Image (cartoon, grey):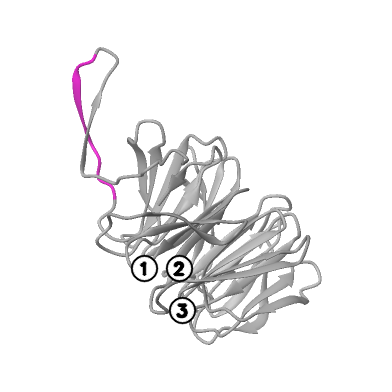
Amino acid sequence: MKTLLSLTLILVGVLLNAQNDLQVVIQTGHAGKINSLAISPDNKKIYSAGKDSKIVMWDIKTGKQEGEVVAHEGSVNKIEFLNDSTLVSCSDDKTVKLWNSKNLTEIKTYGPFDFPVKSVSTNQKNGNIAFGTRFLYIVDSEGKVNKLKTLAYKYYDAVHYMDDLGYVVFGGKRNKSTKIIDDKTLTIVKNINSTALSINSDSTELVIGDLNGSVYYFDFKDLTEKIYSLNSSTVGVNGVDLNEDYIVFARSDGSVEILNKNNFTTYTFLKGHISEVTSSLITYDDKYCF
């Protein structure tokens, strides 16, 4: 079994310095629910975003908090890297912001828009940003904001870019279908019967976590389609990620489940949380965070 990497957000962390003396480092962490995680492209930092309006930067090796910023005036719903040094965030305060990931200083703000921004995703190949309110927006690499005519029943809670294909995948927990569009032609590529809470991809492979207790998988290369159903339709799949062998997803019942991607059976459960797990990711060296 692969090595498990746990990101534990604590109030006070006690670390040993180079002289083996005890050093107390104040770790403020988050004062509320964590909504999103993002790992730096160099695999050295993890960034967490929370309902407390903060983005916090953590060192992967030591677990030490290295910086924080009150990023928005409302819940920070999603964060994602645009390039090696730029982090993008979205919030219930109806804005999308760009941040210098090294020092968490603000670079640019888009908005405010008419509704809370529930999800954001980036295409690191062409520099585009997609985000969802009740509408879907695409910001091109020149900074031009395009509002699409498509309208969510309530919100687009999940938006995701498939960088290699140039596809935007978007849906929501109150929407009966998840749509995939080409970001150049804005035409619909595929409709999926899923009330999406979370979306992720790897090259041509797409995975969707559903409000009603299922994980949907599709590979555009060989048109393979699979669905994994949880034992209960009341358990939502809040966060999904995948690598060559596994799909890892956060469940609303406080556990993390890992699927064997080849046969779509449970590889293992990770338990211990007393409340729902809201986000999960696989690091670049194939370790897990949640």
Residue type (three-letter) at the residue carrying disc 1: Ser
Against 166, is 103 above or below? above
Residue type (three-letter) at the residue carrying disc 2: Val
Return the residue nearer the eye: 194 or 130: 194
Helix, strand or loop at label 2? It is: strand
**Cα–Cα span, label 1 and label 3:** 11 Å
Q: Which residues are magenta?
A: 20-29
Residue 119's disc is none
Sequence-wise first label, 2 or 3: 3
**Cα–Cα span, label 1 and label 2:** 6 Å
Q: Residue at x 72, y 57 (%)?
A: 204
Question: Viewed as shown, does residue 120 lie left or right of 52?
Answer: right
Question: Viewed as shown, does residue 253 lie left or right of 222?
Answer: left
Q: How many marks?
A: 3
Say whether marks 1 and 2 touch (CB < 8 Å).
yes
Residue type (three-letter) at the residue carrying disc 3: Asn
Helix, strand or loop at label 3? It is: loop
Return the residue nearer the eye: 165 or 248: 248
Q: Position of residue 114 (x, y in %)?
A: 51, 79
**Cα–Cα span, label 2 and label 3:** 8 Å
Judging by the rendered image, the residue that carries numbered circle 1 is 252
Q: Position of residue 184 (x, y in %)?
A: 79, 67
Q: Position of residue 76 (x, y in %)?
A: 41, 61
For mark 2, does the 10 Å Cα neighbourhood hold few (<14), some (14 to 19), or many (20 or more) residues? many
Judging by the rendered image, the residue that carries numbered circle 2 is 237
Q: Is residue 287 visible?
A: yes
Q: Residue at x 69, y 79 (%)?
A: 191
Residue 212's disc is 3
- Please say whether residue 186 is one of the residues in the magenta stretch: no
Return the residue nearer the eye: 97 or 58: 58
